[in-house]
Amino acid sequence: MKPSLKQHIAQAMGKEVSSAVPVSGGDISLAYKIDLEGEGLFCKYHKGAQGFAMLEAEKRGLEAIAATGTIRTPQVMHLGKLDHGACLLLEYVERGHPSDQSMARFGEQLAGLHTYKHSSFGWDTDNFIGSLTQTNTPRKTWPEFYAAERLSPQLRMACDKGLLSRDEVPGENLMEARLRDLCSETRPSLIHGDLWGGNYLISTRGEGYLIDPSVSYSHPGMDLAMSRLFGGFSPAFYSGYASAASDLMPEQDEIELYQLYYLLVHLNLFGLSYAGSVKRILRRFF
């Protein structure tokens, strides 16, 4: 850990950093378990001009989820800007070993989060998914929002990078029209927005925590689609969710349709290994 970062944390928290041990913190940040005179905290650090905006979006997302009282997030302790980047300090939560009971309860709690509704799809500001900007201009209908604020920006980016050709990309109006037929009706739900297996944990007390959110008011199927894309969620999790909100569970075709967004994000972040999956879904639905 940089001495300037240690100094910033000490000044912000009024305690000296006794130790800082690197831990897994994602693909785009540095992360540490720090000891502040006996108090353990999690520190995430982003370097560069965009670092503060990314961590501020994460902070706001964590606080929005926590405010619902439905599911836990680590408590936000401090957000700070440094000359060379930014840092976010969170409560340190020790990982435990998930049981069927704890995963079922976690599924029920996620369903509870999805009952928090809004008048429009979107968010009050743009935020991030990974290191990519996620636009959140409010829209009245889900097909309009998914086409304009999720699929179109990622498709344009993929074309600009040469990862897709223009003739492989449907127009926004066509996508919206098709989505009106393909998507189940829903009111805007508060979602985590990037719910892969690395963005939750079960504590040593068996309590589920959401971390590193990309929140918006969207279709609840988005969280379920991402959770199924790369694995990491047990059958007990889905049973728990269904027991609390079976009416929110989308069918498999709709799950695949919502996975398109996350595959596009991975295409733009990590390259052509995701192109085949993206093209297959585009051909199938559009």
Image (cartoon, helix red, strand yellow):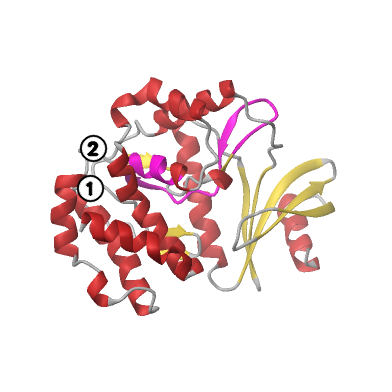
The reply to whether the magenta stretch includes residue 225 is yes
- Whether the residues at callouts 2 and 1 have beta carbons within 8 Å, the answer is yes
Q: Which mark is residue 186?
A: 2
Residue sitting at 71 percent across and 37 percent down? 94
Q: Residues within 10 Å of mark 2 (few under 14, many from 20)?
A: some
Residue 80 appearing in the image: yes
Q: Which amino acid type is shown beneath numbered disc 1?
A: Trp
Q: Which residue was labeled with disc 1?
A: 142
Q: How many labels, in total?
A: 2
Q: Which residues are drawn in magenta?
A: 201-226
Q: Residues within 10 Å of mark 1 (few under 14, many from 20)?
A: many
Q: Quadrant of residue 251?
A: top left
Nearest to N terminus: mark 2 or mark 1: 1
Instruction: Find residue 112 and report its horizontal and vertical position in percent.
Output: 41, 28
Instruction: Find residue 41 and report its horizontal and vertical position in percent.
Output: 72, 45
Which quadrant does the C terminus fall into?
Answer: bottom left
Instruction: Find residue 113 and report its horizontal and vertical position in percent.
Output: 41, 33
Q: Which amino acid type is shown beneath numbered disc 2?
A: Thr
Instruction: Find residue 75 and report its horizontal and vertical position in percent.
Output: 60, 40
